[in-house]
Each structure stands twice: as structure tokens, then as C-alpha cells.
Image: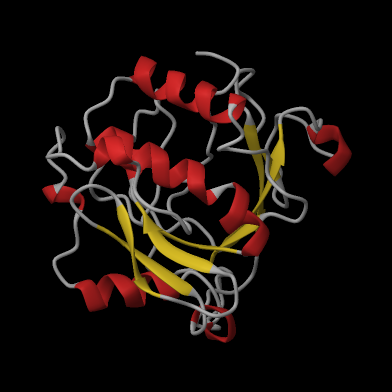
Amino acid sequence: MTSRTFKFAVACAAGAAGAIPAAAQRAPAVDVGPYLMPDRAAEIALARSAAPRSISDSATIMVLGRVGFVTAVQGTNGFTCLVVRSLSDPLTSATRWNPKSVAPHCFNPPAARTVLPTVLAQTAWVIAGLTNEQIIKRFDDGYASHRFVSPAAGAMTYMLSPEQTLGPNNSHWVPHLMFYYDKSASPSMWGVGDSVTTIINGSAGDPNATVLMLLVPVRRWSTGASAMDP
């Protein structure tokens, strides 16, 4: 892979403001049916569960359609919530085609502007049937043309939904926050390396990654319920 491929830990990301790329406006080459939720209202509710209601009630909500994510509710606070599917997992991930993976995210305004567009694009390109090599090339070209940019300072995402289903074991894991940063910034600035601790996970293991993340587990789900073991 080139230096513009992506590393999104666990079950990262999809969809902010912006239209679906024109190349994806044709009949899907991938059977997206297994990844769709038949109840639009249920998907909106699941997307909102990514963050506390004080945030998600006023957020933009996106839902997955036949060619990619589309806006279902226009918000007012700059946050964007949606249920990310495995289609936006790293291109070599073993979980990339897992239709049971549902990962509600709520991106704050800096992340909605600078991180989410890349996830929207990858989801649409995968559905359209582009190869890994074609996707990598489009990301390279997108960064070169400044269609895509590095994560803005403070870019982060809430993943606090008790209904999230992540990873190869389809587990709920734990509620957590994800902070995005550019590859050029060493994980050492956060006090972590490539190892996982009980507090912070540095997802910097891919030398080809452009966007890296720190995962910070928290104590409570978006409902306020405790995530701590008895």
C-alpha cells in the first residue's frame, strides 16, 4: 500500500457532509443488501446512540443507502452521527466484509470536516466495486488535490453506543472516544507507542497509515449506564 492508505482501528468510520462521489452513482457492484438496515428510523436512532443525547439530538444524521451514505436529518451543532459498516474498515482487514459489524459514530465538527469525508468516499467506492488499488489511487489523488486533508486539531469521535457490534467476535467492547491525528505526529506525544494499555490504545502499527487514532475507553455508555464490570 502507498503512504495515503488508511488505518482505522476496531471498526472505524464513515460519512459527513458532502455528496456521494459521482463514480458511485451507478448500480452497485457489491451486494450492499446485507449491510442495509430495513428500518430507517431504527438506523437513525442507532446513529444517535453513539453520543450523549445533548449532542446527538442536534447532530446531522446519515444513513447507508444503495450507493453510500446520505443525509437523513440535517443537524445544527456541527456534529455528524452515523452507523459505520465494515465496508470502511482497512482494505486488508479480516473484518472488512462482516455485515454484522455496526459501529455508531458521532464525529465532532473538526472530524466531520476532515476525517469523515474519507470514510464516505471509501464506503461509496467499495460499494461501486472499485479494487483496492483503485481506491488507493483515488485517495492519493484526493490528497494531492486537497480534496482530502489531514485531521484538524481536536478531531474526535464518540463511540458510546451500547448497541455497537465490533470486530471479528461481534462484541460490544467498551464505550470509547477516538482522537485522530496525522501520521507525521508521533504517538509518543500522547505518551503511548504501539502497545495497548488499559487507558489508551495507540493505533500506530501500520507504517503506511495516513490517519492514526488514539482510543480512550470511558466508564459509561451514552445512556448513562455503567460499562464497568460489577
In percent of width and height, residue 218 lies at: 65, 65
Camera-nearest residue between 26 and 92 = 26
The answer to which quarter of the image holds residue 167 is top left
Q: Is 185 situated left or right of 65 in this image?
A: right
User: Percent from the top left, x then y, of residue 33?
Assistant: 12, 49
Position of residue 139 measured from the top left corner of the image (x, y, whole percent): 49, 27
The answer to whether residue 5 shows anywhere in this view is no
The residue closer to the viewer here, 131 or 198, is: 131
Please state which of residues 157 and 140 is positioned toward the viewer in this rendering: 140
Please tell me whether residue 193 is drawn above or below residue 24 in the rendered image.
above
What residue lies at 22% left-to-right and 43% top-to-bottom? 25
Rendered residue at 50%/47% (across/down): 117
- Where, quadrant-wise, is the C terminus in this rendering? bottom right
Report the residue at 72% width, 35% height from top: 182
Q: Is residue 201 left or right of residue 229?
A: right
Q: Is residue 59 left or right of residue 199?
A: left
Q: In the shown orientation, is residue 30 left or right of residue 22?
A: left
Q: Is residue 205 visible?
A: yes
> In the rendered image, which quarter is residue 121 located in?
top left
